[in-house]
Amino acid sequence: MKPLAPRDSTTLSPEETIHGAGLRMTDQRRAVYDALMVERDHPTAVDVFTRVRSRMPGISLATVYNCLDTLTACGLVKTVQIERGPARFCPNLSEHAHFHCEKCGTVIDLPLRSDQQPHGAWELPENLSITAHEVAFRGVCPRCAENEASK
Amino acid sequence: MKPLAPRDSTTLSPEETIHGAGLRMTDQRRAVYDALMVERDHPTAVDVFTRVRSRMPGISLATVYNCLDTLTACGLVKTVQIERGPARFCPNLSEHAHFHCEKCGTVIDLPLRSDQQPHGAWELPENLSITAHEVAFRGVCPRCAENEASK
DNA sequence: AGCCTTGTCTAGAATTATTCCAAATACGTT
DNA sequence: AACGTATTTGGAATAATTCTAGACAAGGCT
């Protein structure tokens, strides 16, 4: 989902961002957002549901989906699609790509080099305007590589 | 899906590639492969099914999925995942990224610049081995940009 | 040719992730 | 408190894909 408006996370709080979009910061939205911020792995909607439910037993999965969509639309959260699997969610708003380890499944954030553009390596036709990118690599993470080597 | 083995498309025919994986080139696999090669857009499995069925009315959707998986595993076809939508398939084996137009939905292939590496723009930790990448941009394609401008 | 093993295809059921829907609830304002 | 709107909820519905079991086909071997 494309954010409704760009967000400057250095100056706006989550509340302000949500209010800016004409929406409210409800308990559920805060709980979902907190669940993403606390463990900064890349949980699926069901993972988030499980986490949030321990604090807020009445919340429904539909609400978790709603909240994740809302937070994404406000630009507070990014969605990561790994191959054909369930969507994963990530509160890291800085420019980054994702690396997916094919051994252990972990997802690692790879920051964009400060002097680079994400699309620098590809030939773009004239007049192509890029508004978003989703860049994913797969392979073997350092930890798994080490485990392999020590066998 | 990760290819079973790297493939050199300049020297091997599709048959040879499939045989190399210990599999057969059946009528169905050929028909699915041809459907991808003829119209080099980025069809979904159902699109491919529709096309193939006009030539081979008895083919089942499950078979189309099987064939697409097999062709992908052999390295003859690549899978493109655009956001949460259905998987799309692409017989372009050269290194490229995908651009998805948010107005018209078209998918455009963007070749990798000859002097660049796909991951060049991102900071990689030590000992990270990358075996595959899926790079997607979204925005407005040249044609839609022109239509917008002329309004 | 006949038989065997294995690979492949098919239809339909099952699964998974997600979205939709209608009713209930909560919020913010007057 | 009353009102209008936003949000949440549970369950049903949908979409894409995968699974399963049986039928079919191909190639090797006797």
Image: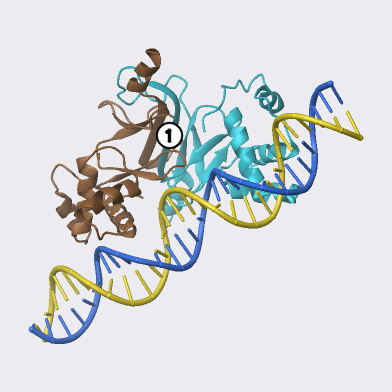
Chain colours: A cyan, B brown, C blue, D yellow
Q: Is residue A143 visible?
A: yes
Q: Residue at x 43, y 38 (%)?
A: A136
Q: Residue at x 60, y 50 (%)?
A: A46
Q: Is residue D17 left or right of residue A71?
A: left
Q: Is residue B39 left or right of residue B16?
A: right
Residue C3's spot in the image, x, y percent?
18, 86
Residue A108's spot in the image, x, y percent?
50, 40
Nearest the viewer among A117 and B90 is B90
Q: Tell me the subunit letter for badge 1.
A: A
Q: Residues within 10 Å of mark 1 (few under 14, many from 20)?
A: many
Q: Is residue D25 left or right of residue A130?
A: left
- Say how many tags the image has: 1
Residue A72's spot in the image, x, y percent?
58, 33
Residue A56's spot in the image, x, y percent?
75, 47
Q: Is residue A24 left or right of residue A108?
A: right
> Which quarter of the picture shows residue B93?
top left
Q: Quadrant of the C terminus of chain A?
A: bottom left
Type of amino acid under label 1: Val
Question: Which element is circle 1 on?
Answer: strand
Nearest the viewer among B41 and A12 is B41
Q: Is residue B4 visible?
A: no
Q: Residue at x 14, y 49 (%)?
A: B13
> Which quarter of the picture shows residue C9?
bottom left
Nearest the viewer among C22 and B115 is C22
When the figure is inspected, residue A14 is found, relative to residue B9, above or below; the finding is above
Report the residue that reaches farthest toward the top.
Answer: B150
Residue occupied by mark 1: A135
